[in-house]
Structures are given as structure tokens and as C-alpha cells.
Image (cartoon, coloured by chain):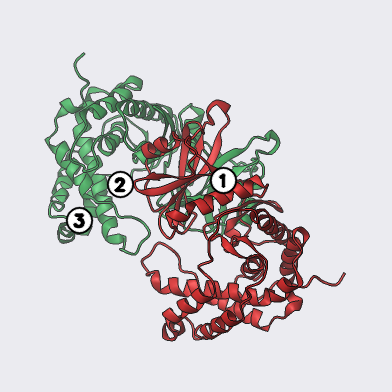
Chain colours: A green, B red
Amino acid sequence: MAVYTNLGAEALSELTSHYDVGRLVSAKGIAEGVSNSNWLIETDGGEKRARRQFILTMYERRIDIAELPYFLDLLDHLAAAGSPVPRTIHDRTGATHRAIDGKAVALIEFLPGISPDKPTKEQLFAVGEALAGIHLAAQSFPGHRENRLGPSEWVETLARCGEDRLAEINPDLPRTLDVARQVKEEWPTDLPRSVIHSDLFPDNVLMVGDRVSGLIDFYFACNDMMAYDLAVIHAAWCFDESGNVFNKELGRALVAGYDSRRALSDEERRALPLLAKGACLRFVASRAFDWFDTGAEAMVTRKDPMQFARRLDFYEKADNSLFTPPAA
Amino acid sequence: MAVYTNLGAEALSELTSHYDVGRLVSAKGIAEGVSNSNWLIETDGGEKRARRQFILTMYERRIDIAELPYFLDLLDHLAAAGSPVPRTIHDRTGATHRAIDGKAVALIEFLPGISPDKPTKEQLFAVGEALAGIHLAAQSFPGHRENRLGPSEWVETLARCGEDRLAEINPDLPRTLDVARQVKEEWPTDLPRSVIHSDLFPDNVLMVGDRVSGLIDFYFACNDMMAYDLAVIHAAWCFDESGNVFNKELGRALVAGYDSRRALSDEERRALPLLAKGACLRFVASRAFDWFDTGAEAMVTRKDPMQFARRLDFYEKADNSLFTPPAA
């Protein structure tokens, strides 16, 4: 949650002049995006004379500029297929991104909607459905990007933190390294793949009522198993804040929504408890690493890795029936 | 530049339901306001069916809730008189502010425009004109609030910092305490008064081209000498970033713009160099105090008090001709 760069009126006006969007009339730095700076900007719409809103993103760190075409072209591909993702606005030369002071910037369509903070089962159904929609639409996307936050990286990251330092955060944390090693051994390789979002937390979903109006922030998107993406949402959305209490209704609604658009295979369904353990480990690992990497003086709030360590416990005890629709 | 409170979809929807503005469709925390949290929110406009935008402000600290009616009623008073300030949106009971979790919140009209970063003389003329406009309109405003950042407070604040600590920031800083004592002695009491903004830095002004589309952030507004408000803008806008180089053209345009709407009296014009010294001292004092008060770990960027100490030097050497229109 930050704006890392101060972008003045002159730079903003100069930038928008390269796009066929009309004249800039407003720009507000918004508190979204951990690795990027973002502005909500408004133009007079040019000849159409109707105000238009956009998100201007400046890529500050973590994003490799060489990968921007993958992320930005993906938005266009999905939007063209009717998925609720924001289009990339192209400049007059057709480019999807430009540079200001050596930093890449992109202009992205603004989508209405609010991130749900207490999602209902109707909302989870809609999210599952929308996820299946992007998986289907992305199968014809030509780009390719490896998942760089897979089983090898969880093990490596947790090992690099070290058992002593993990225990400093919480005495229950070191054992996640053993679980990570085990999950890595069991990790499937033959489940159906597509482009996955891989980080679809509630703050990356915009909703208007029970309708998904936007899936955003695709900067962890990669080619991987579709069912893993579903497992990430299951682990991220279907527990209460303490991380202890699983909400069975929400979990079922999510899977049912996904199934309604793209039916899970038996293999995928059987793999879900394991994939959900992997999803927990992915966030345990990155949060544990950031815990030490993020000094107390940093402007970013540290996220507790224990939240997902507790959910990992849950999935270790869970069985397949968790992901099976209730008998009709 | 921060959003101090996380306000969820549910709390936001509940809040907007008390206003006749339609249904909430978007909310983005914006990186504006040092003492408050702010969101740019959008509604479907209700029966009017045209999207509407608002600023939602949550008063976090520094703001005394008992003073909110002064600030919020002032906006309504000035907007009704045609000044470019945002209206306060009243809830269905007519209230100008409500509470969420014990904190006061207000819904404010959204105004287009961008804060100028390299203002032109045309823009300074327009700002002077707009300032005179609010001074004239506010003369019939019934509220009253003392200026709590006047000469006594500068002296007190700088004395509390102490010469040793001031010298730690910069060896040239301790002498500002002597200047503050002297300016306090000479400070006028009989110049014409109204409600003044008292903090009209460029980031509190929105412009569309050369037109002032919004004057915002009135939370330092108080009843004081109108010419002092003009002096604040003179000191805040008419120097380059280093604080050393005064831009005579900008200064003249500002005063000419003000004069065009409300002619300064001879007494006011004569007092301007002194008032400008006071304006510099006001910001030297608060920035020096915040320098020690704001730990290195805080999320707010410290502002260098030397910027205004250098401008103070300039005004000490300046004479009245600085504020006199060029002979026709």
C-alpha cells in the first residue's frame, strides 16, 4: 500500500498525451499494489466528451520489464474473450507500456467494484466461475511464463530462513519446512494447465453485489496447473481471520462455481487437498522471508506467516470429501 | 500520504447507505492528507443513474471533532457563494459527519483537477483571484476559530525545540528563533480579517489548465488577516525547489490576481514582507518540531525546515516594491 514515486502534473499530462484518451482532468495516487505505484486518473474523454477513468501503474521493483508483455498482453487476451479483467490501453504507436524516468508505466482500464471483506457463498460461487472463465480463455494465450514460486522455491526459501529464525517468529513454524519437502515430493505434474493468476486474494477481486466486476493484479500470473489456482483461492478466502476456522459453505460454493464453468476432473479433485497444502506453503514461505526482509522501519505492513501455517494444519487433516460436491 | 485505517466493503456500503447518493460501486484509498485517511469513492448515482464521485475522509488525529462543523459548514458556505471548494454531502438526517468505530467521517464532493507542480504566472494569477474570492465570500460566515499557529506558537515551538537541536538540523536554523521573536513584536493586529485557508500549498489546489477547479483541505482554516493568507501562497509557490531563487513574475501574478478581485489596501501591501516572514516562520517551526517528532521509522516523509528558513532570509532582505504592481 504505497505510492513510491511522486509523479507531477506535468509528467502525468505528458504521458497521457501519448494516448487517445482525451485530456487529463484528475489524478490521485492510490494505496494499492505492494510492488508498484498506482494512480487513479480521469480524462475528459476527448471527442467522446464522456469522462473516462484509468489506472496508471508504475512498475517500481520485483517486476522484470521483459515480462511486462506477458502480463499486459494477457489482460487484452482475457478481456477480448469476455473475462472481467481490465484492458491494457495502448498508446498511439500501439505500445502497451512506456517509460518515465527509466521506469515502465502502463495505462490500464479502470473497472468498478469493491473487494469483498466478508465474502458470502454467492460471491464465492461467482469467483469460482470467473476463475474457470479465465482458465478456459487463457488456453489460447500464446505467452509462457514459469511459476517461480513453486515447490522448489518454498523449500529453498524456508531453508534459507533457517529453523532458528523461523522458530523466532513462532515455534510451530520450523516444521513447515518438513511439510514443504514432503509436498514437493508428492507434487503432481500431469494435471491440466493454463495461465493461472496464482495470487487471487480478495483484494485482487472487485465485485458489484454478487457479480465479479474485475479480476486484477496479474503480476504473479504464470503457466501452471489450473486446479492449483483454485486451491489458492480456497486457502485464501474460506477461513476466518484467525486462520483456524474453515467455512465449509464457502469452500463448497467456490468449487461448485468453478465446476459450473469448467468441470474438474477426478484427478484434479483428488489432488486438491495436496494443492491446497502447496498454496499454504507458498504464502508461509514468502511471508516468513518478508518477515526478516521487511525491517520494522519499512512502510509495508508485515503479514504473519502463521496464518497460512494454521491453514496448512487444516489441509493436512482434511480428506477429499472437502472438495466433493454434497451428494445431490 | 497514507491510509491509516482499513475500511472494508461492508463498512463502506453501510456508511454510504445513510446518504442519498446511490449505491457504492468503487472505493480506492488515496495517498492524500497527512492527518486523515481518504478514499475516492464512486456510486451509481441512485435514481439519477449517472455515476458520482466523492471523497470520504476519516479524521484520524490532529483534528478536534468539536471543530468539524467549522470546517465542513465553511465548505458549504463557500460553495454556495460560488467558490471552487467541495461541498459537504449531508446524510439523510442532515448531518455533515458520521462516526465509524468511534472515528468521525465526512463525505465531500469530488472536484476534478490536478495540483500544479510547475505553476505558471497564469496559474498564479488564477490562484490569487480564487483566494480573494474565498476571503470575500467568507466574510459572512458565522463560525469562528482562532489561528493556533500564530506568532506566539512559532516562538514557543522553536524555543521548545531548543537551539542545540535546531543546530543539529542545520547551523543556520537557531537564528530563526530570534527572527520569530522580532516578527512577533512587529506583528500587525489591525489588518482586515476573514476566514483564511492558511495552508494553501500547491497540493491543496486543483487546476484544470489555467483555471482553479478546487481549493481543498481547509483543516487549518481560521479567522485571521486576509493578507497573511496571500503571504503564505507567496512564500509557498513563488520559489524554486531549492528555496533560494525567487521568481518575481510568479509573485507579481499572484498579487495582481488577488488585487483583481479584492484590492489590497496600502496598509496590507506594506505589511506583506513582514507577513511573508511570518508565513516562513510558521512552516520553519512546524517542520522543525516534526523533524524530531517524526521518527525515522514513521510512514511520513519529513520536510526540511531549511527550505523556509532560506525563504525567510529572502524576505528579510526584500522591500515593499516586491509586492507593488509594476508601474503602468
Disc 2 versus disc 1: distance between alpha carbons? 33 Å
Q: Nearer the viewer, residue B123 or B134?
A: B134
Q: Quadrant of residue A10?
A: bottom right
Q: Residue at x 35, y 38 (%)?
A: A202
Q: Quadrant of residue A190?
A: top left
Q: Residue at x 28, y 25 (%)?
A: A253
Q: Nearer the viewer, residue A271 or B48?
A: B48
Q: Quadrant of residue A231?
A: top left
- Residue A266, x across and y down, in percent: 22, 23
Disc 2 versus disc 3: distance between alpha carbons? 14 Å
| Callout 3 amino acid | Ala
The reply to whether label 2 and label 3 mark residues of one chain is yes
Asked if the residue under mark 3 is in contact with the one under mark 2, i.e. CB atoms within 8 Å, the reply is no
Q: Which residue is mark 2?
A: A149
- Residue A149, x across and y down, in percent: 30, 46
Q: Is residue B47 above or below residue A216?
A: above
- Residue A153, x across and y down, in percent: 26, 49
Q: Which residue is mark 1?
A: A41
Disc 3 versus disc 1: distance between alpha carbons? 43 Å
| Callout 1 amino acid | Ile
Mark positioned earlier in the residue sequence (2 or 3): 2
For the residue carrying disc 3, how many other residues have a C-alpha within 10 Å: few (<14), some (14-19), or many (20+)? some
Host chain of mark 2: A
Task: Give the secondary structure at mark 2.
Answer: loop
Q: How many numbered circles are shown? A: 3
* The disc label shown at residue A159, or none: 3
Left or right of residue A198, residue B309 in this image: right
Task: Give the secondary structure at mark 1.
Answer: strand
Host chain of mark 1: A
Q: Nearer the viewer, residue A96 or B223?
A: B223
